[in-house]
Image: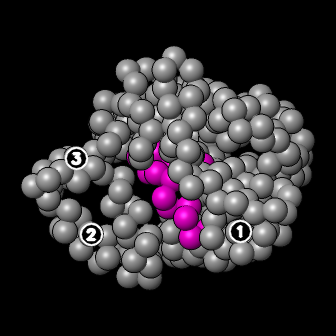
Amino acid sequence: MDLRIAVGDGVHLRVRRHDGAREPSFLLVHGLASNALLWDEVAAELARAGHGSYAVDLRGHGESDLPDTGFDTATAAADLAAVATALELADLVVVGQSWGGNVVVRLAAEHPALVRALALVDGGWIDLTAQFDTWEECETALRPPDLDGLRADQLRDSLRRAHPDWSPAAVEATAANLRVHPDGTVSRRLPVPRHMEIVRDMWDDPPQRFYPALAMPVLLVPAVPDDPERAARTRARVGAAARALAGAAIREYPGGDHDLHAQHPRELAADLLRLA
C-alpha cells in the first residue's frame, strides 16, 4: 500500500507500506537518485516472516514531491523522523543503503528512540573527503551522466546487460529512477543540480561525527569488490567504521553490487531478520 505523508513546508513523501503483525517493523531508506521500489523484494521477504516495513521515497526521489530546498542529509533525516511521527512508529530496525546509510546514521543519532537497530547497506561510512583530494575532483567524478532523452527500452536493456543476475522486478524498480514520457523517452526524477547539492553535502558533512551517539546494534553490510586493491580499501573503511561504533558487526557480500537490495534481496532480508 502506498501512503503520502506530509513532512512540513507542504512537502509530501511517498511511503510504501508492507503489513506484518510481528515486531519490530522495518524502515527502509534508499540511496541517492534511487527510489523505494528497490526495497520491494526485501520487504516481501520481511512480510513473509511476519514483519511490516515502510520504504520511503526521499524528497525529490520516486513519487515524492520535488521542492526547491532540503537536499541534504540533515533534512532527509528530519523528513524520516516526521514520517515516523505521523505513522506513530518507534523501536524500528532502520536500514539505509548508500547515501541512505549516511541519512539513517544521522536519524539514529538525533532520534534514538525510533531505532532499535541499524543496518548500513554499502553506505553509512561514506566520507568523500577521504576518497578525493579536492571538491572539484569529487564533483567531476560523481556528477551523474545526462540520461534525459534516452529511450526507456534502451535503459532497461542496458540495466539487464549490466545486471544479469537481477530479477525483472529489480530492473523495473531501477528504471523507475527516471520518469517515462508519452514518447517513450526518460528524464531524471531528481534533477542533476539537486543531485549535486546532496553530493556537496556529503562532502561537507560525512557521518562519522555521529557514531559516538549510536548505542544500538549496528550491522555494516558492504559490497566488497572482486579487485583485491579495491576490496582492501573497502575493508579498511568498513573496519574503521566498525571500530568507531559501540555495537557493530560486519556482513560482507563479496563481489556484490552496490545495490545489494536489488541483487540479493532474500539474503539481505535474512541478515536483517537476524539483526531484528
Give above or below for 92 relative to 232.
Answer: above
Q: Nearer the viewer, mark 1 or mark 2?
A: 1
The residue positioned farthest toward the top in the image shown: 9
The residue carrying mark 3 is: 187
The mark found on residue 156 in the picture is 2
Q: Which residues are magenta?
A: 29-42
Q: Which mark is residue 46?
A: 1
Q: Residue at x 80, y 48 (%)?
A: 92
User: Which of the two labelled residues, at mark 2 and mark 3, occupies the earlier sequence position?
Assistant: 2
Q: Is residue 233 magenta?
A: no
CA separation in Å, label 1 and label 2:
27 Å
The disc labelled 2 sits on which kind of residue?
Answer: Arg
For the residue labelled by badge 2, is the local secondary structure a helix, a strand or a loop?
helix
Neighbour class for label 1 at 10 Å: few (<14), some, many (≥20)? many
Q: Amino acid at mark 3?
A: Ser
In the image shown, does 208 or 85 lie closer to the viewer?
85
Q: Is 36 within the magenta?
A: yes
